[in-house]
Image: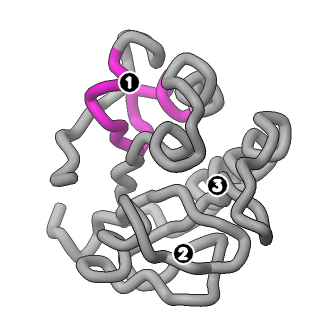
Amino acid sequence: MTDNHRIFVFGSNMRGRHGKGAALHAVKNYGAIEGRYFGLQNRAYAIPTKGHLLQTLPLSVIQRWVGYFVKDVLLGPTKLEYNVTQIGCGLAGYKAHEIAPMFLDLSQDKDSPVYFDRAWNTFLGINAKFWDPPI
């Protein structure tokens, strides 16, 4: 699959300010759009982990946003593949064991077009596919 079909999935804030970490990398390298806090943006996909006041969102709210991402993957173009960063585990401050299991539905399907940060390998099961993020 070409890089044009690889989508960089990152954690965002609900202001759509992509000024640090994976969000800034998404702007510089994948076309993430300032002001947009959720969804597909060129070759990037934002999942909110912080709120409008830049406060960390509760896990239950992040889970809901991850659920929307899962639906988009399952209903979206089949030619796309997604590289998921450790959303919520950087600036939002959560641990991998709190966030990674939110993606189990995608990681258990061996035909899933989703690849996860290798740091999550102990949390996602034997069918999960991994990548090594550049940041």
Q: Are marks 2 and 3 in contact (CB under 8 Å)?
A: no
- The amino acid type found where label 2 is placed reads Leu
Q: Are marks 1 and 3 in contact (CB under 8 Å)?
A: no
Q: CA distance from mark 2 to mark 1?
A: 23 Å
In the shown orientation, is residue 33 left or right of residue 61?
left
Nearer-N-terminus badge (2/1):
2
In the shown orientation, is residue 118 left or right of residue 69?
left
Residue at the spot of label 2: 40
- The amino acid type found where label 3 is placed reads Phe
Look at the numbered disc 3 and give the secondary structure of its residue.
helix
Residue at the spot of label 3: 69
Q: CA distance from mark 2 to mark 3?
A: 9 Å
Image coordinates for residue 63, horizontal then vertical, percent? 75, 39
Look at the numbered disc 1 and give the secondary structure of its residue.
helix
Q: How packed is label 3: few (under 14 Cα within 10 Å), some, or many (20 or more)?
A: many
Residue at the spot of label 1: 120
Q: What residue sits 81% from the left and 40% below the top?
A: 58
Q: Which residues are magenta?
A: 106-121
- The amino acid type found where label 1 is placed reads Trp
Q: Is residue 91 above or below residue 36?
A: above
Image coordinates for residue 33, horizontal then vertical, percent? 50, 88
Q: What residue sits 83% from the left and 45% below the top?
A: 61
Nearer-N-terminus badge (2/3):
2
Q: How packed is label 2: few (under 14 Cα within 10 Å), some, or many (20 or more)?
A: some
Q: What residue sits 59% from the left and 32% below the top?
A: 94
**Colour mapping:** one colour
Look at the numbered disc 2 and give the secondary structure of its residue.
strand
Check residue 81 for magenta coloring.
Answer: no
Q: What residue sits 21% from the left and 52% below the top?
A: 135
